[in-house]
């Protein structure tokens, strides 16, 4: 699992749906939590998700999409500028190791996608993660 540590900058919760905005090295990321602040334990959860708190975001390697020369507006809230440091090619899947501000991240993509993107060490990419795939661990 990929992990990034950051500071909560905003928490918005409505009807059991919570958006937690986290600053990680100057990059704004968002975790979408369903049911996190409703029902039993809501008060404790609200205190744990206070602005200024340090948290760790976690997300699976298979949930990281990669883009080169990304332009335009997209719905994904989490876009991390990275550099490819390694590509382990398999017959169907490839594991791509990334550097994000000195932190190692990983993405698993199809080998066809790795080839189409011409992924190799030194290539600049944007790692994309949907907000609902970000967990606070």
Image (spheres, rainbow, N blue to C red):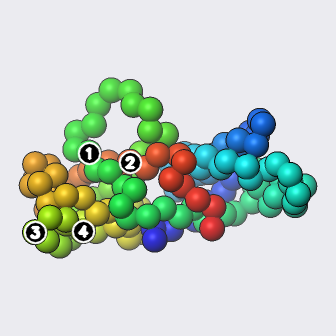
Does dot 4 land on a helix, a strand or a loop? strand
Disc number lying in front (1 or 4): 4
Residue 30 % position (x, y): 57, 46
CA–CA distance between discs 3 and 1?
21 Å
**Residue 79 lies in quadrant:** top left
Can residue 5 be seen here?
Answer: yes
Does dot 3 land on a helix, a strand or a loop? loop
The residue at which mark 4 appears reads as 95
Q: Residue at x 63, y 61 (%)?
A: 136
Do the residues under discs 4 and 3 have CB atoms within 8 angstroms? no
Do the residues under discs 1 and 2 have CB atoms within 8 angstroms? yes
Instruction: Specify which label sits upstream in the sequence, 3 or 1.
Output: 1
CA–CA distance between discs 2 and 3?
23 Å
The residue at which mark 3 appears reads as 91
The residue nearer to you, when weighing 54 against 127, is 127
Instruction: Specify which label sits upstream in the sequence, 1 or 2.
Output: 1
CA–CA distance between discs 1 and 4?
15 Å
Quarter in which the C terminus is drawn: bottom right
The residue at which mark 2 appears reads as 128
Residue 69 % position (x, y): 22, 39
């Amino acid at each position: 699992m990929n992990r990034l540590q950051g500071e909560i900058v905003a928490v918005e919760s409505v009807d059991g749906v919570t958006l937690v905005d986290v600053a990680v090295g100057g990059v704004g990321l968002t975790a979408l939590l369903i049911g996190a602040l409703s029902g039993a334990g809501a008060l404790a959860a609200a205190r744990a998700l206070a602005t200024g708190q340090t948290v760790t975001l976690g997300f699976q390697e298979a949930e990281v999409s990669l883009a080169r020369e990304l332009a335009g507006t997209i719905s994904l809230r989490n876009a991390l500028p990275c550099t490819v440091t390694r590509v382990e090619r398999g017959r169907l899947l490839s594991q791509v190791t990334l550097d994000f501000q000195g932190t190692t991240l990983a993405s698993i993509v199809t080998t066809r996608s790795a080839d189409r993107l011409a992924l190799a060490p030194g290539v600049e990419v944007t790692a994309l993660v949907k907000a609902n795939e970000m967990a606070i661990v």
